[in-house]
Image (spheres, grey):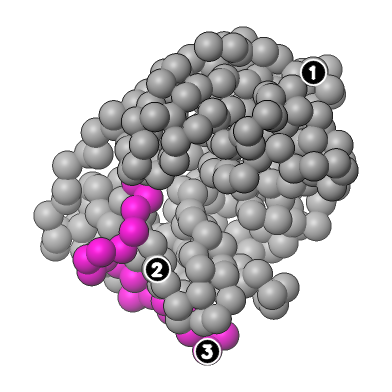
Amino acid sequence: MDRRPKDSWGPWGAGGSRYRGLRFKASLLGALLLLFGAASAADVNAVLMNGRLSAPAVYAGTGYHSIGLVNHTAETAMFHVYRLSRGASVDDLMAADAALQAADGEDVITALEQVADEAQALSGASVSGFSDEQLVVDLERGTYAVVATPSDGSAPQWATFRVTEGGDEAVDEPQARYDAELSGSSFDMPETVVTGDNLWKLSSTGDQPLVVSFYRLLPGSTADDLLAYLGAGGGQGRQPYDESESFVAVTPGASAIVTLDLEAGDWVAVRTAAPAPTAAAEEAAMIAEFRVD
């Protein structure tokens, strides 16, 4: 499997801001989670409807539990789940998040640090109109915030809930079929994968948050074509892929478990580093090519 650095990329990949619109930059602290189609009722539901996001005030149950992200609007919405830091308020987090979404250049680093001070980002999902998804999250006692950002550009909507002990029994920790280890100098993952829904465990062993994205190449396209296209901001030339999956940053020493539904073909995984304290500390993007059969 080919694993190559791509030094010309900035710390957040092509265009520098391609992850910002999906709130990927805020997911610094990671969590062990599972994303899957919501076939059954979730333990906690965050519901976007009529321009408002609602959630129960209190949920009793620590450990692994399901959080339903329900979109009762016509627009796709990006949901994110946060656990507030001790002493922080949702107003503090909202202000820090707004500053992050507006930040550019070196200001991004300061904004990221402020978000990390206010809350731990536990990832999220893009939910199409009139549909829902579920996350299985390792819940601890504390206050949680959910934000839903509609794709039509309207204002983000927030809701909070508090987790206490007792109540519902936790489920077992999800077990992944495939493992991918990421660090500043390596990117280890399987060379072949079976088609369909599979659980992946993405683990960061480096010293800064990392982002992983997956792309299926079009026939005749190469990994170099993909990197050139993304490096130019994604707006020049023929798009060399027809499907993609992107995920939030994985914190050093942490893991994220996600469900990937990959169709047959040649795929490229692109690993990029989150913003570093100095430009000299930026890590190069790396790629891993693999086959899905």
Q: Secondary structure at mark 2?
A: strand
54 up-or-down from 122: above or below: below
Q: Between tags 2 and 3, which lies in front?
A: 2
Which mark is first along the chain, 3 or 1?
A: 1
Residue 198: tell me if it is visible: yes
Q: Amino acid at mark 2?
A: Asp
- The residue indicated by pointer 2 is 132
Q: Position of residue 125 (x, y in %)?
A: 49, 56
- Residue span colored magenta: 32-57
Q: Amino acid at mark 3?
A: Asn
Q: Secondary structure at mark 3?
A: loop
Quadrant holding the C terminus:
top left
- The residue indicated by pointer 3 is 50
Which mark is first along the chain, 2 or 1?
A: 1
Tell me: 152 left or right of 93.
Answer: right
Q: Amino acid at mark 1?
A: Asp
